[in-house]
Every structure is written in C-alpha cells, then in structure tokens.
Amino acid sequence: MKDGIHPNYREVCFVDLSNNFQFVTRSCANTKEMIKLEDGRELPLFKLDTSSESHPFYTGTQKSVDNMGGRVERFRNRYGKGTPAAK
C-alpha cells in the first residue's frame, strides 16, 4: 500500500452526551479529545448528540403518525377530497 493516502483507521470511543452511553468501535472520524477508559486504554473521543440508546425510534418512545389526535384525519378531510385533476 502507498504511504500517506489512507485514512487513520483506529479504535475510537463514541459517547452519547444525552445519557453518557459509551461504545468503542473502529473509525476514521477526526477527533481532538482523548478519553481514558476503565480498562486503562486511552482512545480518541467522539461526542454524539444521539445514539441508538437515546433515539426515540430505537427506544420505542417515538409517536406514530396515526396516534396524533386526529390531525392526520383532519388533513385528509381538508386536502384529500379536493377537486379532481383536469383531464
């Protein structure tokens, strides 16, 4: 392989800032900070706003469009029964 053309692929610690969930995986993500893990390793730190531990879709707290208090039905009534398209 040629030197200097490949990204720096290494282990990186990702931290979800909303609940401090941490996971380590290999990545090319650019980081400026380091974190010391419980096992003594010091890894680059990448901060996340949302991960699978806090995202509503994965946690089961996401609201369904059908459960929005009749808003979908009101929209369908208002705009679904418009004038037929010109032939």
Image (cartoon, rainbow, N blue to C red):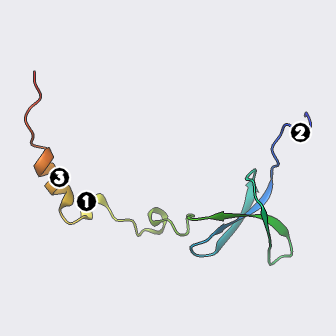
Q: Kindly identify which numbered label has been placed on residue 4.
A: 2
Secondary structure under badge 3?
helix
Name the image quarter holding residue 32: bottom right
Q: Report x, y in % for residue 72.
A: 20, 56
**Secondary element type, mark 1:** helix
User: What is the x, y in percent for residue 11?
Assistant: 79, 59
Residue 69 position in % (x across, y down): 20, 66
Identity, as a three-letter code, of the amino acid under mark 2: Gly
Which one is earlier in the sequence, the residue at label 1 or at label 3? 1
Residue 16 horizontal side relative to residue 8, left or right = left
Q: Residue at x 14, y 44 (%)?
A: 80
User: Which badge, 2 or 1, comes first in the chain's sequence?
Assistant: 2
The residue that mark 1 highlights is: 66
**Quarter that holds the C terminus:** top left
The percent coordinates of residue 49 (x first, y second) are 57, 65
- Residue at far front of view: 32
Q: Residue at x 69, y 67 (%)?
A: 23
- Amino acid carrying label 3: it is Phe
For the residues carrying marks 1 and 3, which lies nearer the camera in this image?
3
Residue position for label 3: 75
Distance between mark 1 and mark 3 Cα atoms: 12 Å
Residue furthest to the top: 87
Residue 22 higher or lower than 86, as above or below: below
Q: Quadrant of residue 79?
A: top left
Q: CA distance from mark 3 to mark 2?
A: 56 Å
Q: Is residue 54 left or right of residue 10?
A: left
